[in-house]
Image (spheres, grey):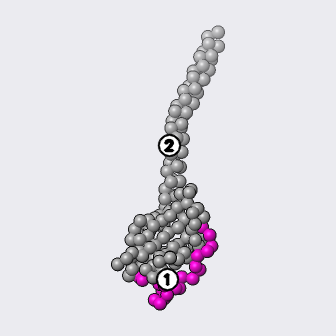
Amino acid sequence: MSETTATALKFAAGIILAIVLVSIAIMVFTPAADSAKSVTTDFTANTTELQDQKYLVYDNTVVSGSQVITALRRFESQAKDEQIALYVQTGKNAAGQWYHAKFDTDKVGKTGASDISATTNVTHSEYINPAGMFAASVHRDSNGVIRAIKFVQEKQ
């Protein structure tokens, strides 16, 4: 009978040990799962910020005309794909001009000028003076996505 008791005690000790190990594992891995979710959320936020960073350079800043021309060339493919619209208002063209696409309220559409060569032609009203200073601003849609960059020439 003592062998049976010893076997039962070993079995009970094995079950208790297994329960303790499972409990320890749950206590260790539950906070780790929460940390992993937190890290994933932070990573997603950082990714979004990095994607927007190329546009945020122009948010509420003053840039030169040469930087405006560079932006028109740099974002040309995104504008043609209607991902972003680019607007330039010069001293000669007070009405301004959308390039490749136009941002209206909440959407980008293909109604902008497709040729930016006039921006470097001194006799044209869309001419962008490389030495001129432009107030740049970024505009978002109702989802918070950057949809337009506007450049307005400052009076000198």
Tell me, for residue 35, which label it has, or none: 2
For image coordinates 53% across by 49% down, the residue present is 40
Q: Which residue is mark 1?
A: 126
The answer to whether 133 appears left or right of 99 in the picture is: left
Mark 2 or 1, nearer chain start: 2
**Can you give x and y, in whole percent of width and height, for residue 114 in the image?**
59, 80
Circle 1 packing at 10 Å, graded few (<14), some (14-19), many (20+), is many
Q: Main secondary structure of the magenta part?
A: loop
| Amino acid type indicated by mark 1 | Glu
Is residue 51 visible to us here?
no
- What stretch of residues is rendered in magenta? 108-130
In the rendered image, residue 128 lying in the magenta stretch gets the answer yes
Q: Quadrant of the C terminus?
A: bottom left
* Spatial separation of the CA atoms under disc 2 and disc 1: 53 Å
Question: In the picture, residue 60 is in which quadrant?
Answer: bottom left
User: Would you place residue 65 above or below residue 32 in this image?
Assistant: below
Tell me, for residue 118, which label it has, or none: none
Question: In the picture, residue 79 is in which quadrant?
Answer: bottom right
In the rendered image, residue 136 lying in the magenta stretch gets the answer no
> Closest to the observer: 2 or 35?
35
- Mark 2 vs mark 1: give the one in front: 1
Q: Secondary structure at mark 2?
A: helix
> Closest to the observer: 91 or 54?
91
For image coordinates 58% across by 66% down, the residue present is 104
Q: Quadrant of the N terminus?
A: top right
